[in-house]
Image: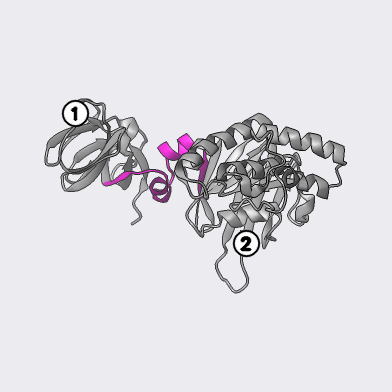
Amino acid sequence: MTEQHVIVEQLVKTYPGSDVPSVDHVNFELRQGEMLALLGPSGCGKTTILRMVAGLITPTSGSIQLNGHDVSQVPVHRRNMGMVFQSYALFPHMSVAENVAFGLEMRGVPKADRATRVERALDLVKLNGYGDRRITQLSGGQQQRCAIARSLVIEPDLLLLDEPLSNLDAKLRDEMRDEIRDIQARTGVTALFVTHDQDEALSMSDRMAVMSAGKIEQIGSPRDIFDRPATEFVANFIGAATFFTGTVVEPRRAAIAGLGNMSFAQDGVVGSQVRLMVRPHRFILGNGGQNTYNGIVRHLVYRGETMTLSVDIGGQLVTVDLPTHAGTLPERGDTIAVSLASEDVTLIGEVAK
């Protein structure tokens, strides 16, 4: 995957009557066959971006290129993009097959060809044999599959998904997450999807762009963003974390009030104040890492596979996730030792003066 299939440059959307842009000079690219997630809280601009790419909203400025052509001013019906809406937007008075065939019919595809392509699309989403059923006869997950089939049957240059799993229950959401990713991988279609759910973004995307207030805070692979967040906003939005403020005493060591020294993997500027981050699952019980601390368990929550502890270390509450199979687990009020490697401490950046 090397070809830049979609290029978004300096994209801006400012709605009439507003001095603040909803989308503020956003840039990103998608390679052929890649799935990119736009992730962020409500109102951050992610859905506005998706709708500008789709052609449903006109940008204030900037460009959207598809296959080397600027489509920023191209009407939505000429962009050859498939879109799966949050509400699915299926026609309840039509059968499953008629819903899937709708886009083909609008494009003037002959009836015989439509039937063949619809059958192939339904087979792709595991709805073969459901063509004659009404939409109201389908479960939520089946309706989702139908919406995906309708989007893919036109053989789009780009597949757009707007919060595609938000209307499903938790178990079905997990199943459909895997299915959508599998369908996208098998078809090789380039995909852009919007979500506020970090688990969806982490598990489904090749890369993810974390947004805040109309801007992209960080873009990268799920692993990079989870393990090496560029800002405190990203670190807070993606997963749980404990933050520490310290003074760098050596390039890779900082002094933290109440804890003592903490080693980290990146180089810091000696004498500067920095913010450090640790994910809860990076701590291990007992001594052993480059960083070892003693603390008192103030609170604990049993979560089945893991137990989450709030540990008071030198006056700071630190969140620690332990696997429940790890022998004898601590109880509230216990004094315990926890440790972690310097590689598990992330330098977020210097504290603004």
Q: Please say whether residue 7 is visible from this viewpoint.
A: yes
Q: Nearer the viewer, residue 317 or 353?
A: 317
Side of 98 where 215 appears, left or right? left
Instruction: Decide which of tag 1 and tag 2 comes sooner along the chain.
Output: 2
Q: Position of residue 288 (x, y in %)?
A: 22, 25
Q: Nearer the viewer, residue 10 or 278?
A: 278
Q: Amino acid at mark 2?
A: Lys
Task: Check if residue 184 falls in the magenta segment.
Answer: no
Instruction: Locate the C terminus and report the quarter of the image it occupies.
Output: bottom left
Q: In terms of image quadrants, where is residue 51? A: bottom right
Task: Check if residue 229 falls in the magenta segment.
Answer: yes
Badge 1 local density, few (<14 within 10 Å), some, or many (20+)?
some
The way the protein has been coloured in the rendering is: one colour
Side of 222 where 182 appears, left or right? right
The secondary structure type at the circle numbered 2 is: strand
Q: Across the whole image, how many numbered discs are drawn on residues?
A: 2
Structural distance between the alpha carbons of marks 1 and 2: 52 Å
Badge 2 local density, few (<14 within 10 Å), some, or many (20+)?
many
Extent of the magenta region: 217-245
Q: Nearer the viewer, residue 278 or 299?
A: 299
Q: Nearer the viewer, residue 288 or 149?
A: 149
Q: Which residue is mark 1?
A: 286
- Residue at the image point whose x is 80% and y is 37% from the top: 115
Q: Position of residue 82 (x, y in %)?
A: 70, 46
Q: Position of residue 259 (x, y in %)?
A: 18, 41
Side of 231 where 319 appears, left or right? left
Q: Are marks 1 and 2 in contact (CB under 8 Å)?
A: no
Q: Amino acid at mark 1?
A: Gly
Q: Position of residue 135 (x, y in %)?
A: 65, 48
- Residue at the image point whose x is 60% and y is 41% from the top: 142
